[in-house]
Image (spheres, rainbow, N blue to C red):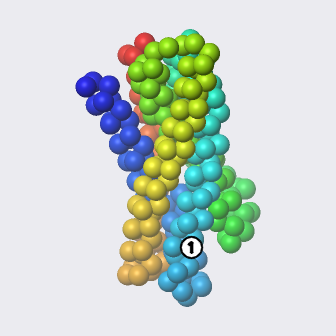
């Protein structure tokens, strides 16, 4: 029962982090609004959101899949999770110190929304935010399986790859739905003037959330050990 509760909490963390990324303007929903208004067609908005979702999904997989391959090293599971937590904390500290947005994002053509979304997610550590949660899910699965033989380890690694796909999919769907709701409200009712007048900056909150997630990852690794 305790493991079931833990896995439920972790999956909710995946979904809520997606909602958090979706409402964050730094993940691209203002670009979707802008694309819809410039083209003057309603269908341009969901198309732009879909391209942003594609780039975000690929960025999540680019971070999660390497960790899914390393999870076969069952004897180093705790060290792997602690190391991942340290990396996430380091990214959060870096973003707190360096508040400037990456200049290369401004050089990406506005029409290449998928590429922009991928680069933005990588630059802001969006995928790293999922790593401690993802490793927690994999840790519970490995605890359920128990057998550390070569064949079992191979099956576990394949299962963790599927977990990576599931986590990236659930997270991206939540992000797209949340960002889509905000973008639709701005597009149909508020307009771009609302963005310029009431722009909210989540940079500090984003950096602090990375640190919190990293600390949570280290704590959960120590508690499950």
> Taking 31 as reference, is 18 above or below it?
above
Residue 194 percent coordinates (x, y): 43, 75
Helix, strand or loop under label 1: helix
- Residue matched to label 1: 47
Residue at the left extreme of this rendering: 1
Could you tell me residue 176's position as x and y percent? Answer: 47, 61
Q: Residue 6 at what x, y percent from top left?
A: 33, 29
Q: Can residue 39 be seen in this view?
A: yes
> Is the residue marked by circle 1 packed among few (<14), some (14-19), or many (20+) residues within 10 Å?
some
Quadrant location of residue 1? top left
Residue 211 is at least partly visible in this image: no
- Viewer-nearest residue: 41 or 86: 41
* Vertical placement of residue 187 versus 199, above or below: below
Q: Which residue is drawn at 74% across and 63% down?
A: 107
Q: Nearer the viewer, residue 217 or 160?
A: 160
Residue at image point 61% right, 44% down = 61
**64 or 208: nearer the viewer:** 64
Report whether 206 appears left or right of 181. Answer: right
Q: In this view, does 144 lie to the left or right of 72?
A: left
For the image, the number of numbered tags is 1
Return the x and y of residue 84 as percentages of the image width and height. Answer: 56, 27
Q: Which of 224 and 210 is in front in this view?
A: 224
Residue at position x 62%, y 57% in the image:
55
179 left or right of 92 in image: left
Task: Give above or below for 138 relative to 38.
Answer: above
Quadrant holding the C terminus: top left
Relative to 180, is 157 above or below? above
Picture residue at 60% right of the left edge, 19% below the top: 151
Which residue sits furthest front? Answer: 151
């Amino acid at each position: 029962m305790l493991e079931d509760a833990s896995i439920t909490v972790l999956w909710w963390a995946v979904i809520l982090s997606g909602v958090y990324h979706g409402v964050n303007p730094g993940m691209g929903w203002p670009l979707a609004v802008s694309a819809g208004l410039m083209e003057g067609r309603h269908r341009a908005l969901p198309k732009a959101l879909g391209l942003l979702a594609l780039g975000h999904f690929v960025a999540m997989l680019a971070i999660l899949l390497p960790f899914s391959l390393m999870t076969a090293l069952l004897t180093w599971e705790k060290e792997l999770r602690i190391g991942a937590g340290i990396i996430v904390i380091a990214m959060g500290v870096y973003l707190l110190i360096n508040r400037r947005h990456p200049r290369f994002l401004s050089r990406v053509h506005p029409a290449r929304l998928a590429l922009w979304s991928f680069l933005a997610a990588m630059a802001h550590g969006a995928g790293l935010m999922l790593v401690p949660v993802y490793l927690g899910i994999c840790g519970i699965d490995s605890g359920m399986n128990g057998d550390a033989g070569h064949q079992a380890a191979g099956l576990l690694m394949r299962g963790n790859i599927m977990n990576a796909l599931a986590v990236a999919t659930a997270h991206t769907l939540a992000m797209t739905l949340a960002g889509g709701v905000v973008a639709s409200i701005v597009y149909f009712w508020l307009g771009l003037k609302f963005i310029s007048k009431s722009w909210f900056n989540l940079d500090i909150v984003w950096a602090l959330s990375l640190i919190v997630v990293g600390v949570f990852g280290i704590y959960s690794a120590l508690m499950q050990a």
